[in-house]
Amino acid sequence: MQTNTVAAARDLARPTPLTVVKTQKMQEKPKPRDAFTLDFVCNVLKQAGVATDEMLMTIKSRENNQRVILQKQYGKNSMTQITPVDVISSMGLRLPSDNKHVVTDELIMKTLADYWKLPFLKIELSKLNSAKIVPNLSEPFARKHLIVPVLVSKTMLLVALINPMDVEALQAVQQATKLNVRPVISTKSDVLRAIERCYAEDRSKEVAEKNRNHFRSFIRSAIKDMPDANLKEGILRPNDTGQFEEKHIVNAVNSLLQYAHEQHASDIHIEPKRGYSAIRLRIDGFLHEFDRIPLEVHSSFILRIKALAGMQMAEKRKPLDGSFQAKFQEHNVEFRVSTMPVAFGEKAMIRVLDHSMLLQRVEDLGFSKGELKIFRSMLSHNNGMILITGPTGSGKTTTLYSTLNSLAEREINITTVEEPIELMHEKFNQIAVQPSVGLTFGMAIKHIVRQSADVIMVGEIRDQETAENAFKAALTGHTVISTLHTNDAPSAVIRLTDMGVQSSLIESALVGVVSQRLVRRVCNMCGEPYRPSQSELQALGISEEELVGLPIRKGCGCQQCRGTGYSGRTAVFELMPVTDGVKLLVHDNMAAHLIRKAAIKEGMRTLQDSVIEKFKAGITTSEEVIRIIGGVDLDAADA
Ligand SMILES: [Zn+2]
């Protein structure tokens, strides 16, 4: 099969202007069979020997069903049309000539390109030079017709599209640009990616981007207004009364904090380097550079933050801590600041805590239907211990508070013991542990038990005293919910015995263990159907057949998701009910991998099951699955 990737680009350099011969001909005499229908594509595939009669039968019988799946994948509000090529390529049909390979959209488009005698172009985003043409064509037009200008010369315009029989679109481009339009064939995903690239910068700026732009202009003004003497020293000083008056810096810091909150950043890092200061934000668990500011304003920037957090402004040689609150869009946001001296000055880290995010509906935490059923059955015991485990930043606290909040719907007494109290809640009786005055976790629990609490939440089990008192409470008619720092559910048992809790206590009081992680969600603005490569499938331990007809997605990156292809996170869960079979092993002090094996036999839902289900549902990507299961001991799971 001949594909012509470079010829089209080479044509642009020809001295004589080219005309769109093909489209003009069709305009005169459109052949009735040349509509871009499933039948048309099927016929071309058959002629080219890509599809057999048997395959065509399969395609036609599955067409409607496949359209329903695709409609779901693209979402209700998608502007993008579903083409016959999408329908066929998403079926995962094997090539008659080579059973190892499936009929992909690229193969179909190349076959069609040959049929139309047009070049096929694999679009390289870095080589697009059509930015100045783009304003002449609207984005809805480009998306509706799946057409995008890719290369432009003085008189010629190369447009990539999937349907050259769309004469109306080609004419419209010609009229709008006054250029000779030459069509080349590409895949739909390439065309959409190019549209995204061409129009993203042109699109009206989001509110968040406004804050970033404000930030930049405030920094520029601050530098401009800086007296020469201070410029050398690199500092803007508070005035004589100690009042910090540099309004540009004040505004810049405000813009940064607001941007961080809008983007749901969990922390802000301001780090002086040689020659500049880098400001980075952690969003969905990953650090992104927000901006670089000149070192001249770095010290003033840090001073402003220290002033807000009530920290010692003059102390620069010691690590310091402080915090402050701000209100953004009715959300009370807490900023916890810590500073530390480094080679090029003082570095600051600010944790952004929007406590309202800690309360969600249990249904919205990320449990699948089956997982929610297991979790609810753990909660339905009216006594016993439920543990939520996972590393730092795995969303344990959100699960804990959201669960308590759901239990508070009933007329029961909920008491929490915490250090510190993360979220004040009117329905909970909350106790802050104060070891300095002798109020430890263990003491507090003993006290609560006497006060007839129904549900006790213990912030974290860190020592034997806490563990034993919590387990005793769980044995005497209380539901106790707590967190533990372990990687998976079975290890929780081992951690407790290591702490010195008797296995008989664990065996009789532990109802279930939940282990969790957060995975990034595919961005809904730029997510599109995606076929994992062979090596990805291997890493996932999934066969290609398993994925046929499933809405596997991946984001190609847009302004909404800052080009990452991800937006927001959801939790994945390992759920281990402590069944009789599991109890036997706990009783005999068995190793974690043996407990895991028994628990799986008795219906434990593993982290791996959970994340793969989310991948198959198009919620997250293969990349995220590999990141999560890479951290779990798979041999133990298979043993
Ligand atoms: Zn996106």
Image (tube, rainbow, N blue to C red):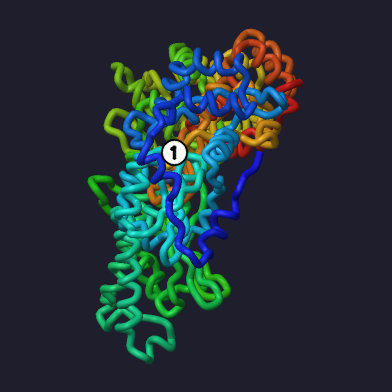
**Foreground pick, 210 / 32:** 32
Amino acid at dot 1: Asn
Q: Which residue in the structure is indicated by mark 1?
A: 163
Is residue 158 toward the left or the right of residue 245 in the image? Answer: right
Image quarter where ligand 1 lies: top left
Is residue 399 toward the left or the right of residue 248 in the image? Answer: right
Q: How many marks overall?
A: 1
Q: Where is residue 265 in the image (x, y as percent from the top left)?
A: 42, 50
Is residue 143 toward the left or the right of residue 377 in the image? Answer: left
Q: Where is residue 88 in the image (x, y as percent from the top left)?
A: 52, 25
> Taking 558 as reference, is 201 above or below it?
below
User: Is disc 1 placed on a helix, strand or loop?
Assistant: loop
Residue drawn at (34%, 36%) of the image:
79
> Taking 331 as reference, is 29 above or below it?
above
Residue drawn at (55%, 31%) of the image:
389
Choose top left, top right, bottom left or bottom right for residue 8: bottom right
Choose top left, top right, bottom left or bottom right for residue 104: top right
Residue drawn at (30%, 55%) of the image:
176
**Foreground pick, 41 / 613:** 41
**Foreground pick, 184 / 242:** 184
Q: Where is residue 7 in the image (x, y as percent from the top left)?
A: 59, 54
